[in-house]
Image (cartoon, helix red, strand yellow):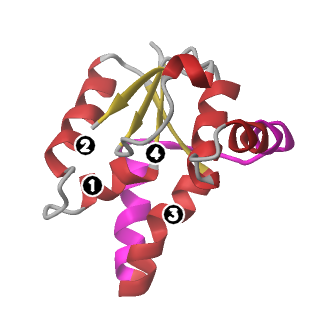
Amino acid sequence: MGLTVLDAGVIIGFLDANDAHHRTAHTALRDARDRNDRLVLPASAFAELLVGPSRKGAAEVTVARSLVDRVPIDIEPLGVDVAAAAAALRARHRSLKLPDALVIATASHLKADHLVTTDRHWPSKTKLELKATITEI
């Protein structure tokens, strides 16, 4: 049993059948569950996930939240150590946006085995000094 940290785009793609990442998001979640991994979504990514549903109304927010509960996906709070690590990542990698740095810092802090994202513009695992295998879907 390992630990997989998910970026918001993975769950967004999973929920939206018209999203370009829909199929690969399903595959990534199935692969993690087949490995019996604990699934984690940083609180910052959870907030990002809820933006679209919040624009559509309370029913859509309920759908997104219930998916997180059913799968299950644990929401990892943003603590001081993760915030400081995200700031350091952002400072070292100018192309990295803060929401992405928060996801990466969470994976690092939790010593995740896998980090799944839809973002293809992150620095390499080596440059990020991550233990986790990064899977771009």
Point 83% across, 36% down: residue: 81
Q: CA distance from mark 3 to mark 1?
A: 13 Å
Residue 38, image x and y in percent? 47, 27
In what element is the residue under mark 2?
helix
Q: Are marks 3 and 1 in contact (CB under 8 Å)?
A: no
Q: Which residue is mark 2?
A: 25
In what element is the residue under mark 1?
helix
Q: CA distance from mark 1 to mark 2?
A: 6 Å
Mark 4 Cα within 10 Å, few/some/many (few <14, many 20+)?
A: many
Residue 130, image x and y in percent? 59, 19
* Quadrant, the C terminus: top left
Which span is picked out in magenta? 59-85
Q: CA distance from mark 2 to mark 4?
A: 11 Å
Point 59% across, 36% down: residue: 104
Q: Are marks 1 and 2 in contact (CB under 8 Å)?
A: yes
Residue 54, image x and y in percent? 45, 80
Q: Which residue is mark 4?
A: 7
Amino acid type of disc 2? Ala
Q: Is residue 17 above or below residue 92?
A: below
Mark 1 Cα within 10 Å, few/some/many (few <14, many 20+)?
A: many
Q: Which residue is mark 1?
A: 13
In the image, 89 versus 23, the foreground residue is: 89
Amino acid type of disc 3? Glu
Q: Is residue 129 above or below residue 94?
A: above
Mark 2 Cα within 10 Å, few/some/many (few <14, many 20+)?
A: many
Amino acid type of disc 1? Gly
Q: Is residue 34 above or below residue 122?
A: above
Q: Which residue is mark 3?
A: 48
Q: CA distance from mark 3 to mark 2?
A: 16 Å
- Residue 111 relative to residue 51: left or right: right
Numbered tag placed on residue 90 in the rendering: none
